[in-house]
Image (tube, grey):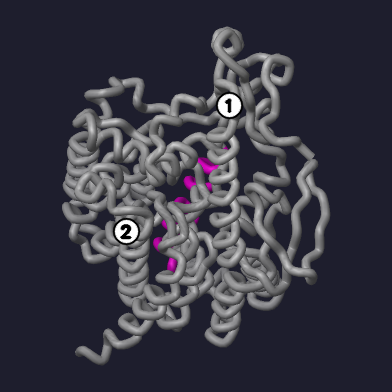
Amino acid sequence: MIRNYIPLVLIIAISFFSRLPFLNNTYGAEEDSYGFVLSVWQTYETGVYETSRLPGHPVHEFFFQLLPYAGCFWFNFFSTVMSLVAIAAFYFIYKELKLKQSFIATLAFSLTPVFFISSTYTIDFVWALAFILLSFLFLLKEKYFACAFLLALATGCRITSAAVLLPFLIFVFQANTPHKFKTYAKLVFTFFVFTLLFYIPVIKVYGIEFFTYYDQFPYPPITKLIYKMTVGVFGAIGCVTIFVFSVLLFIKHKQHVVTIIKQSKILFVFIAAILLLFFIAYVRLPQKSGYMLPIVPFLIMAFAKLLPENSFRFFCVGIMLSLFFFGVNITDSKRGTEYTSFAIKFTVSGQEIFIDPISGPILNDCLKRRQKDKFVDSVINEIENFEANCTVISGWWYNQILVRLHEIGKDEMKTKFVFYISENAMREKLKSGELLFLPEQALYNDLYSGIKTTNKLALPLFDEQ
């Protein structure tokens, strides 16, 4: 019996120790990570719940009230812990579905770029996914109360997780489940009761208007939208792998695919519903690759079912290699990352990007975090030595700057920085000092505030190239 768990223990060990070197490298490259940290601190200090961003992530946010000032290593560490929970849940689901090649499939899931990177910094993506996978595992075992409760926990981490309830109900409808109406009632009632309980602190503070989302940026160009949902999720090699094996399935194994789908109709309808729902959610607000994370384990399961065993091994190897090679990123010296002399550079939608064959997504993310941290320190140092009184429009740097100021004991400087600011507020600030903006933030301040005067009223803190 114990021998059956040796492959999972080995995968868990590989997953944990491969992530460990990245956990002390800031709270992450995403501004939302720092907004989360600030909300945890604010809630702890005031006793009044403050969400990092609407519609709220209360389960994730309240957990860290247990250790609000633990620092980036421990905040990131618990993302890694939840990724291990997700990996174990994936493995047991895989076994429950009697899919082939459980070891290499689970390892491929563990090393999928968006999942690996999300599990090394302070964000709620892997928390929600872990609870979704646990919930599905209990659904397969027909433990409907536990299934609904775990899905409510996932929704308490990310509200978009609630969409998974529909595929669950479809799964139950297709399966030979006795007393389907009773099962539906148990799932839906339990899910909504616990979700409501988790969101009571949010509703209490923000009212019914909590059910919204923020988006300070305009809808991205189609190239960026496609990049974030493909290369940003699976990496360059991973995308090529998925494309090649999809074509092979269509050309060489078309009849086999049709037969398998007919034989496993329940599973494929469920997976199709998951993919469609999270694709729709992403297209509605396509700002982060992490929004597509829930599709990853189910897509791997689909290929496991459809591909011959040897082909599936190569498929998994392609997904795993994608984490380490052919990284794609922007060349921006402040929020981009370094690249080697082997990199190929080109411009897409006005942004210079590179493909580096010997530097993969995980190294790019690591260097990007360091690069952004270095830039924030340079901003703080510049303002600290600035002779006149000033206010700095900081935009997407704002949260990280405030976190850094607290870490170095310079909270008194927080008043010198603002997120974005209206034209009237800018004119007020100019009465008592200079108004400055960080790179690119004049454009986004105009977009956010609905004005066209930021460049006229404020000056760049650094010369913009």
Residues rendered magenta in the picture: 263-283
Percent from the top left, x then y, of residue 438? 63, 33
Q: Is residue 116 above or below residue 465?
A: below
Q: From the image, give the main secondary structure of the stretch colored magenta.
A: helix
Which disc is residue 393 wearing? Answer: 1
Residue beneath the point at 60% across and 37% down: 382
Q: Is residue 205 above or below residue 238?
A: above
Q: Is residue 196 magenta?
A: no
Rendered location of residue 393, percent (x, y): 58, 26
Q: Tell me the crowding category of disc 2: few under 14, some 14 to 19, or many 20 or more residues within 10 angstroms, Cα based.
A: some
Residue type indicated by callout 1? Ile
Q: Specify whether residue 278 is painted magenta.
A: yes
Calculate the distance from the C-alpha at mark 1 to the C-alpha at mark 2: 30 Å
Q: Nearer the viewer, residue 161 or 253?
A: 161
The reply to whether dot 1 and dot 2 touch (C-beta < 8 Å) is: no
Q: Can you tell which mark lies on residue 18?
A: none
Can residue 444 be seen here? The reply is: yes
**First along the sequence among labels 1 and 2:** 2
Q: Name the amino acid, label 2.
A: Trp
